[in-house]
Amino acid sequence: MNRILFVDDEPKILDGLRRMLRVLRREWQMEFALSGPEALERLAAAPFDVVVTDMRMPGMDGAELLGEVMRRHPAMVRIVLSGQCDHATVLKTVGPAHQFLTKPCDSESLKAAVAQACRLRDQLADDRHKRLVSRIAAVPSLPAHYDALMAELGADPADADRVRRTIAADVGMTAKMMQVVSSGFFGSPQRVADPLRAASLFDLETIKALATTAAVFAPSAGNAEQQRRVARLTEHSLAVARAARGLARAETGDVQLADDAYLAGFLHDVGILVLAEHAPDEYPSILAEARRRRITLWESEEDRLATHHGAVGGYLMALWGLPDPLVQAIAHHHHPGRTGDERFSPLTAVHVASVVIEDVFADLFGASTLLDGAYLERLGLESRFEHWNVICREAAAAGDHPVLVHGVAP
């Protein structure tokens, strides 16, 4: 049973939450605090899974509270539940908060936000990885992309199109932008799966504030070899995204599903960026071990870390409020049969696309991941693979993304 701490300086607000969430009392153990200091005392006295706080409180506001929670209790899920806030106030929350929910918020929306984050967290057996993922405020970006973005934002005038295209070409920047869009930091949450469209929802001043004041983008700090791998991983992610979108379009004709498949494909290996950045000395040996033993990279990760990049990436995207079909595709792209999937979905598209495209990027991985034939048979799609193989390779080679991997297209 998840333990949730709600924090608000208005007793009437807390009473309203008690009444609204009474139906969840058999699923959640809930406590309520009237201030940030009181919340920290409760957190020090007993373990909690989630803290949900108002933003505007006297003394210690919500952003300051979540900053302290992030430092003292790094594995905890951190959610803002607040009324409309001014631009500067919201910027303070983008780092320490995983999600921003706007009042009034119905019980189902709140329950869904908490349940998704906690469900994916429970797939990480090691508390060390729960703490690692929960503390992440930015996914490492390709340094060339980061430098191009900061240079363009500093230009007078800045080219808005180039700025947005740079963001949409980078896995780390796209992941953070999708968090900001999906979690409603600057208004109602948006169901957007196109990275370029997501970046286009914000004006240049907001993007500049996110990049500078909130520091939501950060370049990879690895050495030259590690940065080369980030560049190759970006190329791989773009190829899988194109292939997954092409496959979804051909199979279903569903525009939303195809867009979801593209985004999930682009972010499917975000967990590799996280693990490689935060274990720079250990991760190369994990790859070397995969090659030596001729096992997959994710199997080598599980042997050494008791987790794998799919679980890490899926949990991070769940914390950041991305829609569940995308989270599932990221978390389970190597083993979709572990899910209850019963029909073609973004997970299907990303799994097949990643299997097909992985051979082209053999330097990034160990042994090739095998197609989950039992999963496709369960969906009644086992006979489609040869046709899908052609579609994936043609789509990946099309190169229709608006940004080059190593720089912005002129």
Image (cartoon, grey):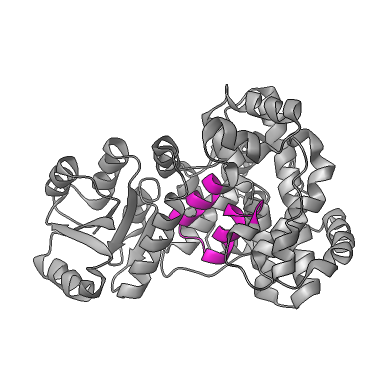
Query: x%, y% of residue 58?
Result: 14, 53
Judge from the rendering whether residue 41 lies leftward or rightward of residue 4; answer left or right: left
Query: x%, y% of residue 333?
Result: 65, 54
Residue 66 appears in view: yes
Query: x%, y% of residue 193?
Result: 61, 65
Task: Based on the picture, tell me whether residue 76 belongs to the magenta stretch.
Answer: no
Q: Identify which residue, 402 or 157, lies in the foreground.
A: 402
Judge from the rendering whether residue 289 lies leftward or rightward of residue 96; answer left or right: right
Q: How many marks?
A: 0
Q: Quadrant of residue 301?
A: top right
Name the residue rendered at 78%, 45% in the picture: 358
Where, quadrant-wise, is the N terminus in this rendering? Answer: bottom left
Above or below for 216 versus 143: below
Above or below for 383 versus 268: below
Query: x%, y% of residue 47?
Result: 23, 45
Residue 168 appears in view: no
In the image, farthest residue toward the bottom: 253
Name the residue rendered at 33%, 56% in the picture: 79
Q: Identify which residue, 400 or 259, lies in the foreground.
A: 259
Name the residue rendered at 13%, 59% in the picture: 9
Task: Based on the picture, tell me whether residue 331 belongs to the magenta stretch.
Answer: yes
Provide the residue span drawn in magenta: 311-335
Q: Identify which residue, 82 or 205, lies in the foreground.
A: 82
- Most common SS among magenta residues: helix
Q: Quadrant of residue 390?
A: bottom right
Judge from the rendering whether residue 399 lies leftward or rightward of residue 46; answer left or right: right
Q: Identify which residue, 173 or 275, lies in the foreground.
A: 275
